[in-house]
Image: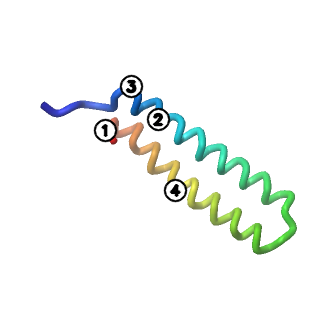
Amino acid sequence: MEQQGMAFHETIDLHEMVNLKTLCVLKSKLMQGVCFDSDLKAMLNKDVELSVRQLNELLQLYKGGRTF
């Protein structure tokens, strides 16, 4: 018997991960505005790009309703 969708605890865990990655993007974007070191800005930009990619992957789990 195949389970459809995610269990409640899986949905909550996914929601927490989306919240964490969203906060990571916001913090890195804000820090880019006050950072004057080009290397640090590049690292922050790379973090934003990676976090956005990871957020898109997490959001696909929401849409697909797949189980972890």
Q: Is the residue 41 above or below the residue 51 in the image?
A: below
Amino acid type, callout 1: Thr
Q: Is residue 61 left or right of residue 48?
A: left
For this orientation, the residue located farthest to the bottom is: 39
Question: Is tag 3's residue or tag 1's residue first in the polypeptide sequence?
Answer: 3
Instruction: Indicate which disc, 3 or 2, sits on the residue closer to the N terminus.
Output: 3
**Amino acid type at image mark 3:** Phe
Which of the two marks, 2 or 4, is nearer to us in this view? 2
Q: Position of residue 9 (x, y in %)?
A: 41, 28
Q: Name the residue under label 3.
A: 8
User: Which of the 4 image quarters holds residue 45?
Assistant: bottom right
Q: Residues within 10 Å of mark 4 (few under 14, many from 20)?
A: few
Provide the residue designation for mark 4.
53
Q: Name the residue under label 2.
A: 13
Going by the image, does 41 lie left or right of 15?
A: right
Q: Mark 1 points at which residue?
A: 67
Q: How would you rate the neighbour count of disc 2 (Cα within 10 Å): few for under 14, some for 14-19, many for 20 or more? A: few
Mark 4 is on which residue type? Arg
Residue 63: where, in percent of width, then height?
Answer: 39, 38
